[in-house]
Amino acid sequence: MKCTRCRAPAQVRLPRIKAGFCPDCFKLYVERQIKRAVKQFDLIGPEDRLLVAVSGGKDSLALWDLLVKLGVRADGLYIDLGITGYSATSREKAQNFADQRGLSLRVVDLPARGEAVPGLAPFGSRSFCSTCGIVKRHYFNRAAAEGGYSALATGHNLDDEAGRLLGNLLRWQDGYLAKQAPSLPAEAPGLMRRIKPLIRLDEYEMAAYCFLSGIDYIIEECPHARGATSLKYKQVLNHIESLMPGTKWNFYAEFQSRRRRFTPGPGVGPDEAGTGAWRQCSSCGQPSWLEVCSFCRLKQKAALGTPSQATPSPAS
Ligand code: SF4
Ligand SMILES: [Zn+2]
Ligand SMILES: [Zn+2]
């Protein structure tokens, strides 16, 4: 197959857009997809200064690389979750990436703060991953606010978002559907606007981009991701995509044009409080729907030493 753009031998085949590219034209294609996503969903303006949530994996490192290449002011944030057999390597990959390019990486060392996720998880009311989410959300918002950033950029790609969309639709989660967008405004002062610039690119394209750009990333997933329901939705969509290339993007893009039909209901806020207005957490000062935010409640329970009956993650 020849490159669709320059007729050199193609190295990356993309059935979903009926094209194939040589390495240089493929990288150009990826950059253009980011620019198109930025324009289509109004993600980044000239005044923006972004904080990129970096995990050491392919998506977040490629995102950071691409944003910097496109001239966007973007620093990285890495949160060391303290997960054995995963965090040390992912931290090393993130730090090496930043050092090699002279980029600024903020690191939150949870084990050093006595807040490693495996230590807090037994005190969470739900799964290991949900505790992890509470901790990450707290530090994302805190780091973004402290550093004066205008938005938090995450490396969610088309596979992640289409899989999540399928899951939310199958369970008719109206509240989550209403909030499933490539750009989410800050819900309260002190919370960050969130953007997903990789939304037009899929898993395979991100891995190919990293390979062709020499980006060294952690290949292993977090051990707690194994067996996650979200992976099953991705597998189903991959099967449909192999039969009908292009379906995944159409599914996601068509949903975006209908998203406003869904309205956020109670129970989808950061504290699952049901109803009520935002207030300041009496302990840490971050916006919360309850007197004390979910992160501080978690820490209080851990200090008291009373584990909850949390559902263990598949790998724990
Ligand atoms: S898989 Fe779960 S525990 Fe691992 S990083 Fe993701 S949310 Fe955290
Ligand atoms: Zn080419
Ligand atoms: Zn708090």
Image: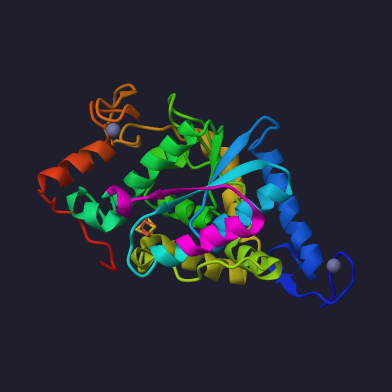
Residue 39: percent from the left, percent from the top? Answer: 71, 39
Q: Nearer the viewer, residue 60 or 200?
A: 60
Relative side of 238 to 301, left or right: right
Above or below 73: residue 266: above
Q: Image quadrant of residue 26?
A: bottom right
Q: Residue at x 32, y 32 (%)?
A: 266
Q: Residue at x 53, y 70 (%)?
A: 239
Determine if residue 200 is in view: no
Residue 96: percent from the left, percent from the top? Answer: 56, 62
Above or below 186: residue 8: below
Q: Quadrant of the N terminus?
A: bottom right
- Tell me, yes or no, whether the highlighted magenta stretch contains residue 89: no
* Main SS, magenta residues: helix
Residue 3: percent from the left, percent from the top? Answer: 84, 70
Q: Nearer the viewer, residue 241 or 214?
A: 214
State the residue lying farthest toward the right: 7
Above or below 182: residue 83: below
Relative side of 235 to 182, left or right: left
Relative side of 273 to 6, left or right: left
Q: Quadrant of the C terminus?
A: bottom left
Relative side of 282 to 166, left or right: left
Residue 25: percent from the left, percent from the top? Answer: 81, 63
Q: Image quadrant of residue 157?
A: bottom right
Above or below 125: residue 145: above
- Tell me, yes or no, whether the highlighted magenta stretch contains residue 111: yes
The total of numbered circles placed on residues is 0
Q: Quadrant of ligand 3?
A: top left
Q: Which residues, given as a range, are shown in magenta? A: 91-113
